[in-house]
Image: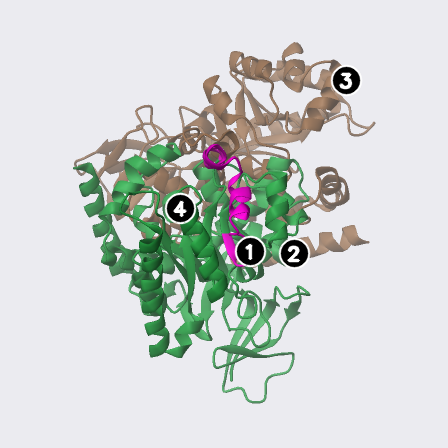
Chain colours: A brown, B green
């Protein structure tokens, strides 16, 4: 048994227990003991004096390879941003670019303690490969959409998703452990980019296969308007009407739900993936998270892609999530630091369908852990309420080590097995190439 | 001549020049040369390959010693926060506590590249002492207010301010250089805590002495309501009516101005000190910064005290300032990264009346400089627009060295002359004592 001995463990379990001076025993990548006494069968004890252990953070919505497009254009409106910059740039990206972008993006996520991410993009095999090599976990959904060109059909899009699933299955067969590190989800992009037929078929398939569905939903006012003009319903009412909604749905953004929409989301136990920085930066708006809480909707937290953030930093995301709703609703009591850390851990696990595996520090869950050293952050002193301290005062500089599946994957400012300097040069070359391409 | 040779200089001068591969010559603490050629009379050249130099950041509104009260209570409403926690705790602070708190707070500010801060608090001599010892600059206003107790009168409050000014003058006489590092301002706390007579007399004295006046203004809805009930006017109209407003006024917050208020602020060239994080955290609201820009009002950026932030981190403050107005106004084009860096540099200098001394990198200005190492921040790559990169992608971890008056005051993660470890223990002791006092 491998044993960690920190000063404080923030469990994020049902009782929100905070444990002082305990031993965390790990066996085969799983938390096997939490005790005040030194475990008898300890093979190695890592003393972590003054350190705080929290569960690995869960980035509930991202497009990790978009680090390549970071800051490609800022401070412009969404349609200019997409049509003039992002889409032309993405058209230039090849599989290798996505692979290197993913390695870099995952490294960036690890630097802020993210151990699992929920991804939607393309060249998904490459993102699976980067997940394996960096040692983290991901839920992978190939973005499918049939309304953007005449060539695309529901059949073809679903075939693409299943081809990717086939490739994942090959990986699972090679190494059974990978079945717990790479998860499949369907990724119909959004109600305005997918036909009703595609959405219906995905919903049926997902229910049959018992897998998650990852979708962008009610992100902007103009999306809501567009769907209303087309269907007479809000995007959420529309998805309800075609039998799309359920506990397995992970809905990113949800900035513009009506009161009735919230009732629907609550009724079907849809999971909301909140991305406050991206929503502010692209001026999509401010999602009504406090209302979602009152409807008992499960809200997880995500960074979105780095092109619209411009970071993959869960500490910044937590900070924003704790601040924005207070100021916007003129109520300092809502969306507390404690609630925000739940959004970044156990709520994320619940959203991804992994509540029994990750998201809290409990016996039999995977040892996905973040070791925080508060002494590395000048704002973390003097000591105060631990949730407030993590969310408002600390930052990713406090992240000293990160463990996934009982293995260290980030130690002292660096990812294990990745040469970040040469990777930085590689993504700079890719970026330079893309800028050259879209300029000519 | 002491010479720095970075890769990039972001001048923040009138032409917003970005200079590549130049030499910055410094003589007697002043920038004396900016050239492509190596200066002939260079005594020492510091090679800074790959580094970016920006002007020292200016924290336009803070209460630096409040780091001691950081996270004393979060996520409660303003009146509970003030009456049950902050005021009782402040009643326990002695001069030494404020001194140590200031040393720690200034160290924290230096870590994010702040070289000048605009302060309002009490035991101001101690904050002056901490300013001297840490090597930074400050504009110091003793908070004066006569409506909070029967003992206080306008005479007594003004005498306190002048006693402090007398003590500052003694320091200036000892060391002439200190006249350029410690500046005096009047600090009438707010329209709701100061009598009309006190406000009138401060305004007259400030005009006569040609000094700044630092005041909290239009921070909350309830302040506006209270002043309206008392005077029939908004706080800004009220201050106008008593002859208080002018170019020398530094108004913190200004969250709730009416259109007419904005016209008034613009007419009198009042400077606004924007504190987005504190305004969100205390749920005061979101100041209409974009409107202020359209009225040509000078807007500077501040952190407020750490009790309501909970950091003294200009990188977080810049990030928030660039994000919040876009999302709140559903317009991604407003309050650009470039505007935000102006708010944190040259606009701050203008607000403090120090436009000719600091806030940009120009010949004859003080050498208050921040050396950024982008390689220390994983989110800073790939390279992109420099303003966007600083505001959205970098953080205080990029701050490698800080110079004030031509002297290094922060090098490689540590303040010069301050033992941060023993100081951390000291402020923890003070905090423990205060928590004990207010609990009993």
Horizontal and vertical percent for residue A171? 54, 33
Label 3 close to label 2 by CB (< 8 Å): no
Q: Is residue B124 magenta?
A: no
In the picture of the structure, the residue carrying the numbered disc 3 is A230
- The residue at the point 44 percent across, 27 percent down is A347
Question: What is the CA distance from the residue labelled 2 to the residue labelled 1?
Answer: 37 Å
Neighbor class of circle 4 (other Cα within 10 Å; few <14, some 14-19, many 20+) is many
Do marks 2 and 1 share a chain? Answer: yes
Please report whichever mark, 2 or 4, sits nearer to the chain's N-terminal start: 4
Please report whichever mark, 2 or 1, sits nearer to the chain's N-terminal start: 1
A285 relative position to A389: left or right: right
Question: What is the CA distance from the residue labelled 1 to the residue labelled 3?
Answer: 55 Å
Label 2: which secondary element = loop
Q: Nearer the viewer, residue A43 or B283?
A: B283
B326 relative position to B198: left or right: right
State which quadrant residue B76 falls in: top left
Horizontal and vertical percent for residue B401? 45, 67
Q: Nearer the viewer, residue A317 or B287?
A: B287
Provide the residue span drawn in magenta. B221-250
Question: What is the CA distance from the residue labelled 4 to the residue labelled 3?
Answer: 59 Å
In the picture of the structure, the residue carrying the numbered disc 4 is B194
State which quadrant residue B82 falls in: top left
Question: What is the CA distance from the residue labelled 4 to the residue labelled 1?
Answer: 18 Å
In the picture of the structure, the residue carrying the numbered disc 2 is B385
Q: Chain of mark 1?
A: B
Residue A260 higher or lower than B345, as above or below: above
């Amino acid at each position: 048994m491998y044993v960690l001995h920190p000063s404080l463990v923030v469990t994020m379990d049902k009782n929100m227990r905070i444990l002082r001076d305990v031993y965390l025993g790990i066996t085969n990548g799983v938390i096997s003991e939490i005790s005040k006494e030194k475990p008898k069968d300890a093979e190695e004890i890592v003393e972590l004096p003054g350190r705080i252990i929290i569960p690995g953070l869960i980035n509930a919505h991202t497009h990790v390879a978009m680090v390549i497009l970071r800051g490609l254009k800022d401070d412009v409106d969404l349609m200019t941003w997409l049509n003039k910059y992002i889409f032309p740039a993405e058209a230039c990206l090849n599989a290798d670019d996505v692979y290197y972008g993913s390695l870099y993006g995952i490294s960036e996520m690890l630097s802020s303690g993210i151990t699992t991410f929920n991804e939607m993009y393309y060249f998904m095999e490459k993102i699976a490969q980067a997940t394996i090599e960096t040692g983290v976990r991901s839920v992978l959904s190939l973005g499918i959409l049939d309304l953007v060109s005449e060539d695309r059909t529901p059949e073809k899009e679903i075939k693409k998703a299943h081809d990717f699933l086939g490739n994942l299955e090959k990986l699972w067969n090679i190494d059974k452990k990978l079945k717990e590190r790479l998860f499949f989800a369907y990724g119909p992009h959004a109600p305005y980019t997918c036909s009703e037929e595609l959405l219906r078929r995905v919903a049926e398939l997902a229910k049959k296969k018992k897998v998650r569905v990852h979708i962008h939903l009610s992100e902007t006012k103009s999306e809501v308007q567009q769907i209303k003009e087309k269907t007479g319903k809000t995007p959420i009412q529309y998805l309800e009407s075609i039998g799309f909604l359920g506990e397995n749905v992970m809905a990113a953004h949800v900035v513009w739900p009506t009161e009735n929409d919230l009732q629907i989301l609550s009724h079907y136990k849809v999971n909301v993936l909140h991305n406050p920085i991206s929503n502010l930066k692209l001026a999509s708006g401010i999602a009504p998270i406090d209302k979602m809480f009152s409807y008992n909707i499960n809200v997880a937290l995500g960074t979105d892609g780095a092109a619209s953030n411009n970071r993959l930093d869960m500490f910044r995301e937590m900070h924003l999530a704790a601040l924005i709703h207070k100021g916007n609703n003129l109520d300092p009591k809502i969306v507390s630091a404690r609630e925000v850390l739940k959004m970044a851990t156990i709520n994320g696990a619940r959203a991804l369908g992994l509540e029994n595996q990750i998201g809290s520090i409990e016996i039999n869950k995977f040892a996905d852990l973040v070791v925080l050293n508060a002494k590395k952050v000048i704002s973390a002193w003097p000591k105060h309420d631990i949730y407030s301290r993590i969310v408002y005062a600390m930052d990713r500089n406090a992240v000293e080590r990160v463990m996934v599946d009982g293995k260290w994957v980030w130690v002292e400012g660096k990812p294990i097995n990745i040469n970040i300097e040469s990777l930085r040069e590689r993504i700079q070359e890719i970026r330079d190439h893309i800028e050259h391409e879209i300029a000519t």
